Image (cartoon, grey):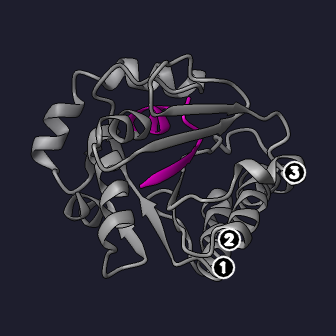
Amino acid sequence: MKVLIFGATGMVGQGVLRECLLEPDVSLVQTIGRTATGLKHPKLRETVHADLLHYDAMEDQLGGFDACFFCLGVSSAGMSEPEYQRLTYGITMAAAETLARLNPGMTFVYVSGAGTDSSEKGRSMWARVKGKTENALLSLPFKAAYMFRPAGIQPMNGERSKTPAYRLFYSLIVILLPLIRRILPAYVLTTEEIGRAMIGVARRGFPKKILESSDIRNAV
C-alpha cells in the first residue's frame, strides 16, 4: 500500500506516520507539508510545499497512491470564520479535489473532531466549518472516504502538538490521560490507535463513513 500523509509534523500526524512506517503492508509513505519531519527511513519520501492551496506544479508527485491520511488542521481560537474556513475547508478541499482526480481508487481519511456539525447550521463556528468540510469530502469520487472524529487523544511516543496552547494543555494533563482513558475508554484514543485505524479502514473499509472515537477503536 502506498500512502500519502498531510500534516505529518502535527501531533496526530506524527503518530500516523510512525504507524505507517512500522506497517509491513505499507511500501511507501509520502508526506506533504510546509515543513519536513526530519525523519529518515527507507519507506519515507518527503515534499516540502509552501502553498497548500495549489498543487498544479506538483501533480506528477501525487498519483499512484492507495490512501491519503489528512491530519492537517489548525485551532480556531482567535480566528474569524472566513479565515478558519480558508485554512480548514479551503486547504483540505484543494488537496482532496486534486487527489480525487488523480487517484480515483484512493481511500481518503480526514481527521475532524468530536462535536463536528454535519448540519453546518449549529452555533459553534469550528464545528460548522468542519461539518462543511466533511460533507464536501464525502461527495468526492474517491473509492472511499472516512471522517475520523476523535475526542481525547493520548500521545504515546513523544508526539507533540505544533500549537503552543495545545502543548501547554497536554503538559498539564499528560499524567491524567491514562486515568481518564481507563474511566472513559470510549473517549480517549492513543495516537497509535488512530494510526492503526487509518491503515485498517484503508485496507478493509468500515461500515460507517463517519467514525466517532469508539468506532475508530473498533477499526484498529
Q: Is residue 111 left or right of residue 218?
A: right
> What residue is disc 2 on?
100
Element on which disc 3 rests: loop
Query: Quadrant location of the C terminus?
Result: bottom left
What residue is shown with label 1?
140
Residue 140 horizontal/vertical position (percent): 66, 79
As for residue 20 lying within the magenta part, the answer is no
Label number found at residue 88: none
Magenta segment range?
1-15
* Marks 2 and 1 close (CB-CB < 8 Å): yes
Image quadrant assignment for residue 8: top right
Place of residue 124 in the rendered image (x, y in percent of width and height, measured from the top left): 62, 62
User: 153 and 48: which one is in front?
Assistant: 48
Residue type for callout 3: His
Sequence-first disc among 2 and 1: 2
- The residue at 68%/45% (across/down) is 76
Please tell me which of labels 1 and 3 falls first in the chain.
3
Query: Residue 143 vs residue 155: left or right?
Result: right
Instruction: Look at the picture and state if 64 lies above or below 3.
Output: below
Look at label 2 and name its amino acid.
Answer: Ala
Q: Amino acid at mark 1?
A: Leu
Q: Secondary structure at mark 1?
A: loop
For disc 2, the neighbor class at 10 Å (few under 14, some 14 to 19, many from 20) is some
Marks 3 and 1: in contact by CB < 8 Å? no
Give the Cα distance between marks 2 and 1. 7 Å
